[in-house]
């Protein structure tokens, strides 16, 4: 560092040095003040190039996992809609089973059996209505074989396949709705239909449990990645405040020294008196 005795006033070395120190301190003070204002340690790539790149990569992963978490929620909703329909159909099939058993009573006459057949036909029509009306975002889930997949992780291969068996009165009971008569009530395949529906409900339960596990894992992963990103990107407010206070004092002392350095050549004017 250059020093001057002060006798050469054409170049005020002391003032230049004080001015340079003031600029450096003011620039550094501005950095710490910006960190306090934004809460971020890295506000541009120049602050920490490698940290900026790493944090942006983490941010991309966090956003991807957040989208996957939304997908998990949608998949759970799809399963919930399908499960509700299957359970209602299972209840109807149980009622039909009860009617079928009742019709096997030899003490019943033809009119009573016809009434039971008419009631079963009505219940079967309701099964068809439920199958046709069970939709999610306009897509039928049970009236035709439904199959799709949801991305439930940040990797493209992290997918979960979702499918449902088509259920209709004919497929479940072996007879079309409206075709049941007192003569063929006993031939209805109610037990087979119940087995089919209950199997689908069991599959839904198992897959919903998987989705709940994935949901918990994604939530934990997002939290941990956010914490890692925070250690890189976020400012330590207490530390930044300490630095700001120190630099504010140095800025004041540098300003005072600059003023003093600018006025020191005035002392040599006395030589001309």
Image (cartoon, grey):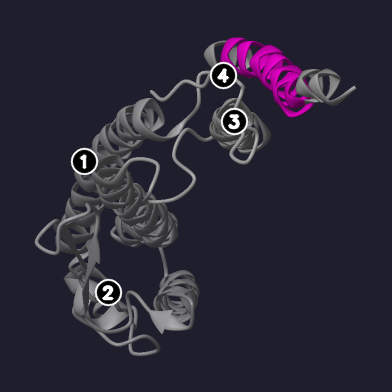
**Which element type, helix, strand or loop, lies under badge 3?**
loop
**Which element type, helix, strand or loop, lies under badge 4?**
helix
C-alpha gap between disc 2 and disc 3: 101 Å
Which residue has dot 3 on it? Answer: 8
Q: Nearer the viewer, mark 3 or mark 1?
A: 3
The residue lying at 21 percent from left, 80 percent from top is: 145
- Label 3 crowd (10 A; few <14 / some 14-19 / many >=20): few
Magenta segment: 242-265
C-alpha gap between disc 3 and disc 4: 41 Å
- Label 1 crowd (10 A; few <14 / some 14-19 / many >=20): some
Q: Nearer the viewer, mark 4 or mark 1?
A: 4
Front-most of 61 and 174?
61
- Label 2 crowd (10 A; few <14 / some 14-19 / many >=20): many
Front-most of 140 and 28?
28
C-alpha gap between disc 1 and disc 2: 24 Å
Q: Nearer the viewer, mark 3 or mark 4?
A: 3
Residue 264 on the magenta segment: yes
Comes first in the chain, label 2 or label 4 = 2
C-alpha gap between disc 3 and disc 1: 83 Å
């Amino acid at each position: 560092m250059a020093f001057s005795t002060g006798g050469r006033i054409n170049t005020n070395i002391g003032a230049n040095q004080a001015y340079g120190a003031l600029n450096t301190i003011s620039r550094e003070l501005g950095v710490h003040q910006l960190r306090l204002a934004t809460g971020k340690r890295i506000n541009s790539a120049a602050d920490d190039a490698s940290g900026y790149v790493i944090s942006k990569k983490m941010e991309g992963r966090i956003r991807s996992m957040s989208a996957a978490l939304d997908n998990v929620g949608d998949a759970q909703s799809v399963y919930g809609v399908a499960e509700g329909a299957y359970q209602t159909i299972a209840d109807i099939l149980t009622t039909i089973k009860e009617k079928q058993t009742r019709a096997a009573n030899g003490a019943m006459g033809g009119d009573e059996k016809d009434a039971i057949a008419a009631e079963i036909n009505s219940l079967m029509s309701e099964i068809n209505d439920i199958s046709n009306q069970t939709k999610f975002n306009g897509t039928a889930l049970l009236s035709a074989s439904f199959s799709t997949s949801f991305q439930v992780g940040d990797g493209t291969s992290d997918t979960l396949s979702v499918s449902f068996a088509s259920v209709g009165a004919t497929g479940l009971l072996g007879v079309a709705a409206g075709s049941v008569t007192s003569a063929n009530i006993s031939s209805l395949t109610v037990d087979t239909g119940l087995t089919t529906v209950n199997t689908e409900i069991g599959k839904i339960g198992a897959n919903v449990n998987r989705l709940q596990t994935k949901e918990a894992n994604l939530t934990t992963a997002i939290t941990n990645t956010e914490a890692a990103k925070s250690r890189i990107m976020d400012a330590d407010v207490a530390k930044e405040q300490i630095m700001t206070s120190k630099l504010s004092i140095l800025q004041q002392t540098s300003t005072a020294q600059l003023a003093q350095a600018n006025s020191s050549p005035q002392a040599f004017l006395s030589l001309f008196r």
